[in-house]
Image (spheres, rainbow, N blue to C red):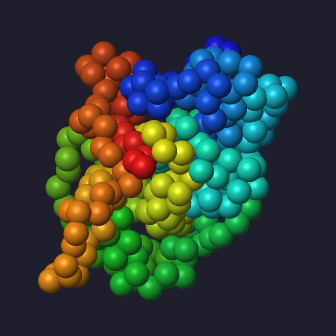
Amino acid sequence: MGEPLAHVPVLLDAALDGLRLMPDGCYVDGTYGRGGHAAAILERLGAAGRLYALDRDPEAVAAAQARFGADRRFTVEQGSFEGLEAFAARHGIAGRVDGLLLDLGVSSPQLDDPGRGFSFQADGPLDMRMDRGSGESAAEWLARAPEREIAAVLRDFGEERHAARIARAIVQARASAPLRTTSELAALVARASPGRDPHKHPATRTFQAIRIHLNRELEALARCLEQAVRVLAVGARLVVISFHSLEDRIVKRFFRDRAHGPVLPRGLPVTGGPPAGDLRIVGRPVRADAVEAARNPRARSAVLRIAERAA
């Protein structure tokens, strides 16, 4: 089960340690990607172990079936992890999952394929959908969205300081011709952005924001985390790898709030102490060391957090 050269899983050892794998355990990879983490999990499972995988991208699912379809311990299905609870119910594993892994964002093969439109490093169509069979493409959304909506998306999901200027430039440009390619959008953003960060292309935040908006990534993450608590067995682990502050903030707050337990109305009499939370935070956040960051640039921004399902 050697890992393809095109994809290097991020924080692999930390993720496997966090899951606390058992040979006969039942695990879910909610973001299969190109199977780097899944391959390593399967290597550590015995004949009685099971790995279930989800991915929104039909190409990722096809790759999973080609790679592991003959392994009876492995099951993969196309879909978003925001349908985690229904997925677990269909396969009879609700409340019996020993570990759930979420490796957020886009995979390296998606970024490296110009046809997907996720990156401005090579010219390609403005698509950016995880599932190209559903929803609006980036080009379609940019062609019809009001200027105020575009600015809000760039500001809220990209933390872009020049959101209003970029949105205005997009609306002005599309009056002459629609934006259709990644290079067109990247060049427009560069022209509209005053000043330059020497370490980051000026279009980085814009591309991130549009991708997150089109795929409803933050909403899906919040819904998945809520369901994860109900799907996991007591003592099971939830491991989440985030790649930007918006994702990590959602995970951090969710872990903290569920570890503290429900907030009771002020003045309500409580006997036996406050109610306990249903998650326990395990250890401190993990980041890639200098060796991994040098070997895999995508790991530089990664943050891994672990929580355990409490009784």
Residue 304 in the figure: left or right of residue 104: left
Estimate the x, y position of residue 217 in percent, counting from the top left: 48, 60
Front position in the image: 228 or 221: 228
Q: What residue do we see at 22% from left, 69% from top?
A: 271
Residue 153 in the figure: left or right of residue 271: right
Vertical arrangement, residue 44 with respect to residue 300, above or below: above
Vertical arrangement, residue 29 with respect to residue 277, above or below: above
Q: What residue do we see at 57% from left, 61% from top?
A: 82
* Image label count: 0
Vertical arrangement, residue 229 with respect to residue 73, above or below: below
Residue 156 in the figure: left or right of residue 62: left
Q: Looking at the rendering, which quadrant does residue 148 occupy?
A: bottom left
Q: What residue do we see at 34% from left, 76% from top?
A: 151
Estimate the x, y position of residue 77 in percent, counting from the top left: 74, 48
Outermost residue on the front side: it is 271
Front position in the image: 102 or 218: 102
- Specify the quadrant that holds the N terminus: top right
| Residue 93 can be seen in this image | yes
Estimate the x, y position of residue 261 in percent, counting from the top left: 30, 62
Q: What residue do we see at 32% from left, 57% from top?
A: 277
| Residue 210 can be seen in this image | no
Estimate the x, y position of residue 231 in percent, counting from the top left: 57, 53
Front position in the image: 147 or 227: 227
